[in-house]
Image (cartoon, rainbow, N blue to C red):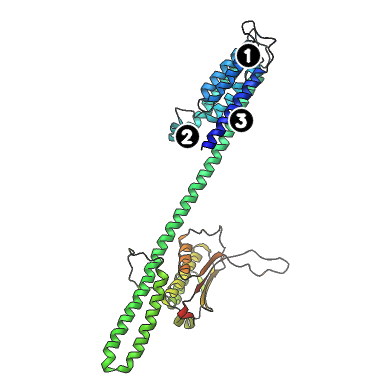
Amino acid sequence: MTTGTGRQAGMDWLVCVLAAAATGLGATDTLASWLPHPAIPALAVLQGLILLARRRAPVLTLAGTTAVALLLTVGGYPAGGAAVGTFFAAYAVAMYWSGGPGRGDVERAEHTGRARFPVGSAAMVAAAALALSAANLAPDARGNGLNSVGLAVLSAWILGYALRTRRAYVAELVERAARLEAEEGERAARAVAEERLRIARELHDVVGHSISLITVQAEAATRSVRTNPDAVPPFLATISATGREALAEMRRVLAVLRPDAEPEMSPQPGLDDLGELVARFEDGGLRVRLDAPLAELLPELPPGVGLAVYRIVQESLTNVLKHAGPGATAVVAVEPGAGSVLVSVLDDGRGPTAPASGAAHGIVGMRERVAVYGGTLRVGPGPSPSPSPGTGTGPRRGFQVRAVIPLPEEESR
C-alpha cells in the first residue's frame, strides 16, 4: 500500500509540473493591459498546484483550474495553453468523483450512484467547456479556439469515464470470480466432509458386524469345549480371520472416522446385491448388462470393498438414468485383478454436455470411497467408437466411470 501511495504521489507531482509547464509556454504578446506579464508564471504554477488535489477533490480542482483558465483566456492568453489544467481536471472528475456524499453512499445505493455519476460529472464538465468557449468572445481574448477548447475538455472527460468504466468492469469480474471460487471451494470441502462422515458410518457398520460375528463364534466355541471339542478349532479360525479383517477395516477408516458421528446400525449392501440393484434400474426403464463373476468375487472381497463397489455402481447407474437420455444402455463390469478389483460403468447415451464438476456430491462420494482403499477413479466421456471406413475417428459418446480398488493384503495373497 505504501508503494502504491508513493506512486500516486509521484504521478500527481508529474501532472502538476507538466500542466504548469504547458500553461506557461503560451505567447504573451497579445495580453490585455490589465494582465501583467509576470502574472503568467504565477498563474501557471497555481494551475499545476491545484491539480495536486485532483484525486481527493476533483470537483474543486475542476472549478479552480477553470477559474484560472478563464482569467487567462479573457486576458488575451492562448486558450489552449490556458485550459491545460482544465483538461486534466475534467479527466480527474470522470475518474475519481464518486457522484455523491461519499464512497459509502455509492456502495449503499449502487444503482442510483452509477446513474448519478455520469450525469452530474458530465454536466459540470460541459459547463466548464462552455465557459471556456464563451471566454473566447471577451473583448481582450484572442478569439480562437471557440469550439476546439470545449471539445478538448469534453474529450478528456470521455477518456476518463471510459477508463473508469473499464477498470470497474474488470474489478467486478475479478471479484465475482474470486467469490465464485471461494463458494465452490466451500461447497467442495463441505461435500467432502459430509461424504467422509457417511463413509465412516458405513464402515463402522461393517466393523460392528465383524465384532458381532466374533462374539457369536466365541460363545459357540465356549459351549462346544465340553460337548464337542472337535468343533472348537473351526470356530477359533473364523474368529482369527474375522478379527484380522476387522482390524484392516478399522485402519482404513481411522483417517475419516469422527468420534461424534452417530452410527447407523443398518445392514449394508454388497456384491451379492448387485443383481437386485440392476433389476431395480431395469424396472425403471434402463437397459443394463451386468458382467461380473460374482461366484469368484464374493469369497475374495471384504465387506468394505463390496460396499464401495455397490455404491459406485449405484451412483453411476443413477447418473445414467438421469443424464444419458432415452434408449441408453449401460454395461456394468466388475473384474478381479492382481491384488485389485476393477469397476466400470459405461453407457452409450448422449454423453456429458459439460465437464464433470469435481464438487458434485456423487463424484465426491465415489472418489472418497475409492480413496479410502488407496484406489483411483476416472470419470469422463466414454471411449471413441470404431471409425467407419473413410470417416476417421468418430465422436465420443456416452459416459464412463472407472474405478480401481486395491484389495487388502490379506485378501490379495
Q: Which residue is mark 3?
A: 159
Q: Position of residue 287 (x, y in %)?
A: 51, 71
Q: Earlier in the sequence, mark 3 or mark 2?
A: 2
Q: From the viewer's perspective, is the residue at label 3 or at label 2 nearer?
A: 3
Q: Residue, x 50% and y 74% (percent of image)?
A: 406
Q: From the viewer's perspective, is the residue at label 3 or at label 1 nearer?
A: 1
Q: Residues within 10 Å of mark 2 (few under 14, many from 20)?
A: few
| Mark 1–mark 2 distance (CA, rounded to whole Å) | 44 Å
Q: Which residue is mark 2?
A: 111
Q: Residue, x 63% and y 13% (percent of image)?
A: 40
Q: Earlier in the sequence, mark 3 or mark 1?
A: 1
| Mark 3–mark 2 distance (CA, rounded to whole Å) | 22 Å
| Mark 3–mark 1 distance (CA, rounded to whole Å) | 29 Å
Amino acid of disc 3 = Leu
Q: Quadrant of residue 139?
A: top right
Q: Nearer the viewer, residue 384 or 10?
A: 10
Q: Which residue is mark 1?
A: 40
Amino acid of disc 2 = His
Q: Residues within 10 Å of mark 3 (few under 14, many from 20)?
A: some
Q: Is residue 107 above or below residue 304?
A: above
Q: Is residue 271 left or right of residue 261?
A: right
